[in-house]
Amino acid sequence: MEEDVLLLDFEGVYLFQPRLLERSKHFDLRHLRSVKYMCDETTLTLVGKLVERAKVALLGDSAYHHFSYVFLTFIDTPFELVVFDNHRDDMKKASTLLTCDGWIRAAQKLRNLQAVHIVRRKNDLPRCLKHPIYLSIDKDVLSDRFLKLGWSQGSMKPEELLEAVGFLREKFEIVGVDISGEPRDALEMTRSEEINLELLKIILKDEFSRATLKSSSQHHHL
């Protein structure tokens, strides 16, 4: 069974996003060690067994973006990968570890992955694709004027990101989505949660609306 929204919480960041936490399945992974920036095959396999295929998976800090790879391995049909990221994440390194700046290079070896498209600015958005897409969104593509993540960021405005995701949602079949790029400052969490919820509204559409209404109804009767 495919889940709606999964939260892979390696540092407890989603405990500061109560509205998002309320409508998602939360995996508390704070017990895992040596997973930030990179992980070994054993840990990757373990996480793959813990989680399940999801419509949307949230991965936490950008330093955990390499766990996108887990969800790519679940896809059993040809697809193209569209990545919103201020960094390429396809660095060539001689290592047995899967890294947050090299996971795309590893993913390119997957049999069903047909093409990779990196989006850093609105003009980079692919317009003609031959296959369904998996969408991987790192919010470090946003300017730090709108969300401060603690490392180098891009130049997009939140509304540009939302518009771009909306375009892809309307034009192409989406087989999966992940979102990373949570801030390290708790004061930024509220803004980050708002962006996450706006992304979910666009990606899930009616599913999100039904879940929100159900949640509101439950609270009303408490």
Image: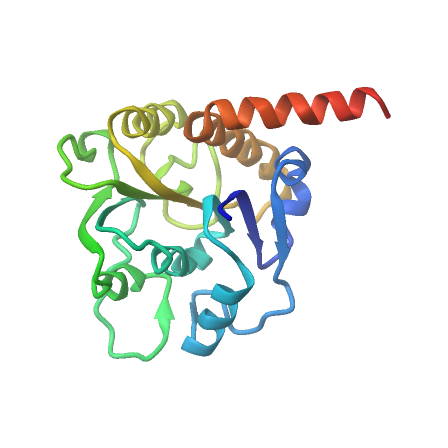
In this image, 105 relative to 58: left or right? left
Seen from the viewer's position, the closer of residues 1 and 86 is: 1
Seen from the viewer's position, the closer of residues 113 and 67 is: 113
Q: Quadrant of residue 177?
A: top left
Residue 199 in sight here: yes
Image coordinates of residue 128 in percent, x first then y, are: 13, 32
Image coordinates of residue 50 in percent, x first then y, are: 55, 63
Image coordinates of residue 43 in percent, x first then y, are: 49, 73
Seen from the viewer's position, the closer of residues 171 and 186 is: 171
Seen from the viewer's position, the closer of residues 186 and 179 is: 179
Image coordinates of residue 135 in percent, x first then y, are: 33, 42
Residue 181 in sight here: no
In this image, 209 relative to 73: left or right? right
Q: Quadrant of residue 98?
A: bottom left
**Where is 130 relative to 215, above or below?**
below
> How many numbered circles does the render carry?
0
Q: How is the image coloured?
A: rainbow
Q: Quadrant of residue 63?
A: bottom left
Q: Residue furthest front?
A: 1
Residue for point 64% across, 39% down: 17
In this image, 116 relative to 14: left or right? left
**Where is 207 relative to 134, above or below?**
above
Residue for point 18% across, 30% down: 123
Q: Quadrant of the C terminus?
A: top right
**Where is 62 relative to 24, above or below?**
below
Residue for point 25% across, 31% down: 172
Residue for point 67% across, 25% down: 214
**Where is 133 relative to 222, above or below?**
below
